[in-house]
Amino acid sequence: MTGGAGGFAVVRAGPRRRGRTDAGRRAAASASPDGRVLDELLVPRGAAADLPGTTYREFTTTLSDPRGGPLRGDVVEVDLTSPAVRVDLLTPPVVPAVATVPELAGRAGAIAAVNGGFFDEGGTGAPVGAEIVDGAARTSGVPVGRRPSPPAPPGQGPDTVVGLDGEGRAHLARVAFRGSVVARDRTVPLAGLDGYAVPVDGVGVFDPAWGDAPRGPTTCGSDTDPDAPCSADTLEVRVARGEVVAVGPPGAGRLPDGTVALVGRDRGAASLRGLTVGMSVRLSYGLGAVGSPPLRVALGALPLARGGDVLPGLQDTERAPRTAVGMSSDGSRLWLVTVDGRQDASIGVTLAELARLLTDLGAPVAASLDGGGSTTMVRRGRDEGLTIVNDPAADPLRAVTDSLAVLPR
């Protein structure tokens, strides 16, 4: 693969030297005078053992600002029109759970995979943003103030996702959660699905995908402060087959198939109090794509570039390991990219530099996934097993909430 706007070619890196360092973690605003990240002409060194529909390369370069240093990364380019491959979202069996990228990719027989979206690391393990799997909402995420992820650039909403439609084309889209429960003369709006933080005064819906995790803690903290007190007024209403089957405090344990729990806090709890056991209700909820076709697969992401232009307002001071997704304007090609960081051999990039790197690669549309210690890429060559091809900063390897993967059809 050769670069587009950046005028470069990617090559296999030499022997890797681990050794983390704080040097270079804070950077100047640009990688080079013209703003490119991959600003050197590199010479290809042999062809990778690519599988049909994919092209894999490694790159090395040097960030040329006064506080720069060496940089290396990995790229898998996917032809989404190829009948040989498809892209999917891999997840643990339940929403509040984590697994390593090799575990997720190995179970699915993936050709290549990277870590996915930001998540509640050290807590539930649940995603902070939305997920759609096989066309169905898996989680709607949590309020923006409860997300341990960088803020979206100005004018870009927090509900942005990287998604693929039913035809397999990629989109940088928006999604919106809508839901309600209707009973007799009342309609109660729902605020989210399987999120680790129910909005203040809201009602969240939980289904069996929430697993065994207790639902009470989802009513703790405020919409902006995870350490704020738990709500004093909470209520859970369980619904099965269109009928209320239980009313009480928020519970724990896996819900039976076909059963959901409506968990309200404060005014949300008050709105549920008219619901009693045996009452018939009509429940509806889901995630809908805004301004794009319906999505078969989606995960929350931070927008970096649109129309070939780097978005303004991206963080441009701290360098770190990064994971990103790029796509062509027509959604027919996808780039999975990891950049190593916090090591002597690779200092990492800022979000603004990451955006420029993706446009250098030729991707006019790009978004960041989770980075830092989460950044992981695996691939499978011809007649080879699955291997980790980047140099993760976390040791041992960090377990993550989901993985964007290339699978054989």
Image: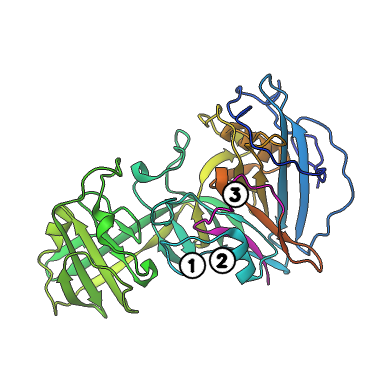
Residue appearing at x 72%, y 36% in the figure: 345
**Residue 140: quarter of image:** bottom left
Residue appearing at x 58%, y 65% in the figure: 104
> Which residue type carries mark 3?
Asp
Who is closer to the viewer here, 296 or 196? 196
Residue extent of the magenta highlight: 389-409
Disc 2/disc 3 C-alpha distance (Å):
37 Å
Place of residue 251 in the rendered image (x, y in percent of width and height, measured from the top left): 23, 67
Residue appearing at x 13%, y 55% in the figure: 233
- Give the number of the disc on residue 158: none
Residue picked out by circle 1? 135
> Are the residues at dot 2 and dot 1 in contact (C-beta closer than 8 Å)?
yes
Image quadrant in which the C terminus is located:
bottom right
Disc 3/disc 1 C-alpha distance (Å):
35 Å
**Horizontal arrangement in the rendering, residue 290 relative to residue 100 (left or right):** left
Place of residue 37 in the rendered image (x, y in percent of width and height, measured from the top left): 70, 31
Who is closer to the viewer here, 379 or 404? 379
- Is residue 292 at least partly visible in the picture? no
Residue 142 is covered by the magenta coloring = no
Coloring basis for residues: rainbow
Residue picked out by circle 3? 395
> Could you tell which of marks 2 and 1 lies nearer the N-terminus?
1
Residue picked out by circle 2? 166
Q: Nearer the viewer, mark 3 or mark 1?
A: 3
> Which residue type carries mark 1?
Gly
Disc 2/disc 1 C-alpha distance (Å):
8 Å
**Residue 41: quarter of image:** top right
> Which residue type carries mark 2?
Gly
Secondary structure that dominates the magenta span: loop
